[in-house]
Amino acid sequence: MNTALIKSLVRQHRRKILFSLLILVVLFYSLGTGFPFFYRLLFTLIVLVGIGYVWAWLNLRGLDVRLTRLGNRGRVGEFLEGQIQLINHSRLPKSWLEVTEDTDLANPGGRTVALVKGQVRSFRIETYLSRRGIYRTGRVSVTARDPFGLFRISRSFLNEQSYTVLPQTVPLPDLDRRFANLPSDSAFSRRTPAITPESSTIRDYAHGDSLRRIHWPYTARMNRLMVKEFDIGVSAQAWVLLDMERRSHFGEAPDNTEELAVTLAASLVQHWDETAVPVGLAANSGELWTLKPDRRPAQLGILMETLAGIRADGNLPLERFIYDLRPQLSGFNTLMVITSSRRPEWTSALVGLRRQGINVAVCYVDPNSFPLAEAGASPGITGQITADYLTQHDIPLYMVRRGEDINLALSRPVAAGPPRISGPATAGGDGGPPNETSPSPVGAAS
């Protein structure tokens, strides 16, 4: 067994150990000497143990616990607040009660209280939300102690509920203008026989037209049946592709490339939603996610909840995921890829999308700016090499480093470096940027 674990258990149960040793010593002297004093002392110690246990057990009887809380979602950096009410229905007073919320959130709030007969106590609890995720909350744990500190008995109240901590978001007022104001109105349209919310013109009634297409006010004015023509408006749509392959991420949670990538994705999703641009999300985590762009009001909440629970546990390579996503993209789409991968293969997949007329950009989370990234790194490309290659194909790359202002990092792309002699290309046509034999520091962004 681990030495540190043994020391921790000894510190936690020190009083029990000392009291047990005292009973053993008194028992030894009682049997060895036969003096009545030691027998009386032994009997007294045993009675005290019984009284302590019964005291702690009775402290948890006759309690009624209630927890009042509004909402089941919060955001990183906020507090999970609640109101706990304790009611003592028994005739015995309650003392040394430790009331905490039984949750897997870090540092849950709580308080130590005492209650007399029939008393009602209420107090607020606050738990700082430091990490995104889906947590269990709602259950309250009450722990009672005896006066001698020998026993610690806990009892749980209420039912368990789930609480979603949404990822942190950063306002992006200075987002690069080529992505800040995508056209969200129906700038492009085409005729459709179906009835849509967008009516483009009016024509004479033709045999077979539905009565629902008749424009009655204009029919009365023209004194003949007139029907409406409908269009399908095609507006710009944005996609956020979040690389959640396990090989792409470095560092230890919560200060790692995964958390920064999710923050970037959440910030972009919120920005485009605020500007009325339909936005979708795709991620190659352990569970593949493909949430298409949608105008419905609930879309932002769905995307944020997905980002709250997503983890970098995927095995599908980024380039394969890009190829699988290609049929769902068109020339009216903007694709923002967020990755920290050092592998060069995914760049060729993006070049293929760009040649199809899809607006493509990359948010590159610099893995070299995170602790332990170098130790666990595998040979691969650097951010500047990737930027040079993608810039040649009209794909901007935005470099985001640990601790850097995200709004500033996304305000302008990394400039192409000076011309360099290209090394051997990877397999597959132009195959992506040259692959370095070892990772080197990322070039500076201008």
Image: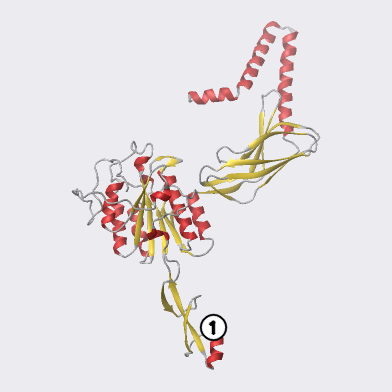
- Residue type beneath disc 1: Arg
Out of 220 and 240, give the one closest to the viewer: 220
Residue 415 picture location, percent across and down: 30, 51
The secondary structure type at the circle numbered 1 is helix
Looking at the image, how many numbered discs can be counted on the residues? 1
Residue located 72% across and 10% down the image = 38
Density class for disc 1 (Cα within 10 Å; few <14, some 14-19, many ≥20) is: few
Height in image: 189 above or below 249? below
Q: Is residue 33 visible?
A: yes
Image point 57% across, 37% down: which residue?
107
Q: Nearer the viewer, residue 38 or 6?
A: 6
- Front residue (pair 54, 446): 446
Residue 173 locus on image (x, y percent): 45, 55
Specify whether residue 312 is in view.
Answer: no
Question: Where residue 278 sits: x, y (%)?
Answer: 46, 63
Residue 203 % position (x, y)? 46, 87
